[in-house]
Image (cartoon, rainbow, N blue to C red):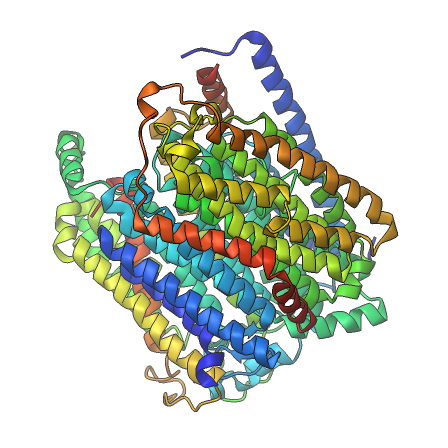
Amino acid sequence: MIWLHSIPLICILLTLLTAAVSLPGRGRWGEGLCLLTAGAVTVLSAALLVDLWRTGESFTFAMGHFPAPWGNELRAGVFEALMAAAFSAVALCSLLAGRERIRQDIAPARLGVYYAQCSLLLCSLLALIYTNDMFTAYVFIEINTLTACAIVVAKDTPETVLATIRYLFMSLLGSGLFLIGVILLYAITGHLLMPNILAAMSQLAASGEYALPTGMIILLLSLGLAVKSALFPFHTWLPSAHGSATTASSAILSGIVLKGYVVLLLKIFYRVFGLEFVHRLRTPDLLFVLGLAGMLMGSVLAIRERDIKRMLAYSSVAQIGYIFMGIGLSTLTGTVAACFHILTHAVTKPLLFCAADGLMEASGRQRDIFAMKGAGRRNLLAGVAFAVGALSMVGIPLFSGFVSKLYFALGSLGDPDKMLPALLMLVLSAVLNAMYYLPVLVTIYMGDPVDGALRLERAKNKGGYILAVGALIGLNFVLGIRYPAVIAAIERGLATL
Amino acid sequence: MNRLNDGERGIFRRFQAGYGAIGLLVSGALAAVLLLTVSYLPGFGQADRPTENEVSQRYIAKGLEETGATNVVAAVILDYRAFDTLGESAVLFAALAAVILLLREEPAALARRMAERKPFEPDQGPILRITARVLIPWLLLFGAYLVLNGHLSPGGGFSGGAVTGAAMILHNLAFGPEQTRRFLSERIFFRLLVGALCFYGLAKGYVFFTGGNHLPGSIPLGQAGSIFSGGLIGPLNIAVGIVTACAVYGIFALFDRGGW
Amino acid sequence: MGENLLRNYLEAGAVVIFSVGFSTLLLQSNLIKKIIGFNIMDTAVFLFLAAKGYIAGRRAPILTGPGGDPAQYINPIPSALVLTGIVISVSVTAFALALALRLYERYGSLDLNEILLSREGEKT
């Protein structure tokens, strides 16, 4: 029991110490250590998930010898454990699949630093998921920002430097808004721990005191986190940052870093303000509208893009739109759908980035989609992986994307005002998704390469790549076929949040 | 390089102008909204505010008894809310690692750069050297004082570490990197940094582990007000001081020449 | 409009400075100015926090003996938060400056608009 409940702490400390130890190392030392830690964290989080799922309980873990309003706390339930297990598994798969590319893109002397940053990124994500304290959340948001920027700029080209600068400054605007929100929250409640703020909030809501500051605080916190998770119209930094980084970084950033903030936002809605209060203040309506706009604009911009990695990055903008739309629906099913889509996108987008990497490799390192004619036949695994990811994003049954869309549609039925726009946009967005994913599929399977020399080449994939891509494909089908269990876990997690 | 034609340039400029107008509007709206919010907040300097609750009262009333530190702020950051401070050291570490990632040169390139720079290095002159020789011992002493007395008086690992780091930067500027490298080579630098961070993580990990599982912690708090008091706060301050001094000096060295 | 705007002059000043920093960070195209804007923004938050911690007529929270009287000392929490915030702000500034240095090495300019313009030119 002691050890099980210490798992969140152990995971956070383990990743932090790994980062410290792998910094001075050169070459393979950091790589092996980081992968090992990510694997250990995945196993530990999965063990925690299984245990919490069986008992259905949640617990808080005091960080020190002082109880709640005085000390600092972690908190874990089914929701947190599920997200932590999924995120660390995706991080592990992305690093494993992108390992060869990292070795090519990043100078050997910098490998240790790169992996230190990756461990620290995982550490900050875990802390964001498990924390029960608003100021701790701010501190780890900043770690997340720094490390996320660092793993983009690790591939040292003019393009990545520029992309990182735009990413960093947009993120700083977001964290500035979040910080002032947290401080205002402290000013009116006198607490920093989530349950204590919630208690103070319910008193304030009952007495009607500080009504305006409270509304502003929710708005500031939501907007701050929305900027950092690239909700339209704050997405401008995303395509260049995700499109130019090394494959593993793109996969990690698109797959899990964007979602870490969404998870935190959900925890803030549930555990800091209380859902009823949030719904009364109509902040979700704003998120709903921005989410709809993001679904549309992300897809439209993706259609215009010929660079495959930038296309995938724009697709992430659209998927983040889905997630915020689901949260904005303000129904339980909508939120469940949003959480399920967090998982769907977390396993699908890294798969697509890794597959795109394999396809690019089989087409002479060209990023242009039209240069990839026949690439799916030259690298079979990458072709299949891209097909699975694309079909899932379009929303074909049996794939995980279908289940999220189904639940988004079900969730929209609960709110008569939002039902029509949500359903229309879901259909439109599915058509738009098909419009950019299917032509790529046709291109990589039909067509012959422009460069005749490529025709006979057959790519050989490394063991790590095969294992990681296989695992991601498997996870995709698990989510698509065994979805009732996952939905049940999310529902139980949200109920105890 | 192909330049844009005038039409495209015009579109870009107009886009920029539109962006500027919207941005200005957003900032103005933010200022107005925040001012409106401030106008509803409890009055400045008042004692009956929501922030004056059982949390801050207990920190003052029982802080010394529970943590052994007379400096309540140190008690808050290194004991009550120590997880934040662990994160804070991790931020420093992350920034240092990111700067290493960006600016570190290979040893060969570093040596070449230093050799190229040599003829252009100004002579520091006797004023700087003698001032540095007089100042540095005092600075180091003051830094150590701030670190070691962090639990008793204003100061602590971060401020003390910053002073110590500044002393090392002064040494470097006055006597040149070769002299500084004699006692702070790359190897020693990384050993200090990683050692301090690992000690910090493990020590706090032990406290979090025992605290979270309601096990007794067995660290004596010591005689209140003496230098050996405050339980782990003193050693933690030293670790934080080392991390901060390393980060300050390391970032300077990387900006200056891309290595140690 | 609430009644405490003038009384909370420090907080009001802090949020105005915050907005100045925010707009500098958002609108300036010169990187160094952007970084300065970020520092202005964070410093404004520290001013806000320090103002929140202050209580008229009370002392800094350095105890002189066990069992301090809460009515004699100011609130220590905002001071602790400012300390954490300063370190974060310094770290982020160091990283941003390193990025600016790298950008200058790559493009020969610190002005984002200029760089974007010349890059658009490369593409066409």
Residue B218 x, y percent position in the rendering: 37, 90
Query: Would residue C121 be found to the left or right of residue A102 on screen?
Result: right
Q: Is residue A465 left or right of residue A336?
A: left
Q: Is residue B220 above or below residue A430?
A: below
Q: Quadrant of residue A407?
A: bottom right
Q: Nearer the viewer, residue B11 or A243?
A: A243
In the rendered view of the protein, which quadrant contains the C terminus of chain A? Answer: bottom right
Q: Is residue A181 above or below residue C58?
A: above
Residue most extreme to the top: B6
Tell me if I can see residue A128 in this picture. Answer: yes
Q: Residue at x 46, y 42 (%)?
A: A384
Task: Say which of B66 and A239 sits in front.
Answer: A239
Indicate the quadrant where residue A80 lies.
bottom right
Q: Nearer the viewer, residue B50 or A369?
A: A369
The location of residue A449, given as percent across then percent down, is 40, 22
Query: Which residue occupies the foreground of this view, B152 or A171?
Result: A171
Residue at 61 percent across and 69 percent down: it is A192
Residue A52 spot, x, y in % from top left: 56, 77
Q: Position of residue B154 (x, y in %)?
A: 43, 70
Residue A161 in sight: no
**Number of numbered discs overlaid on the protein picture:** 0
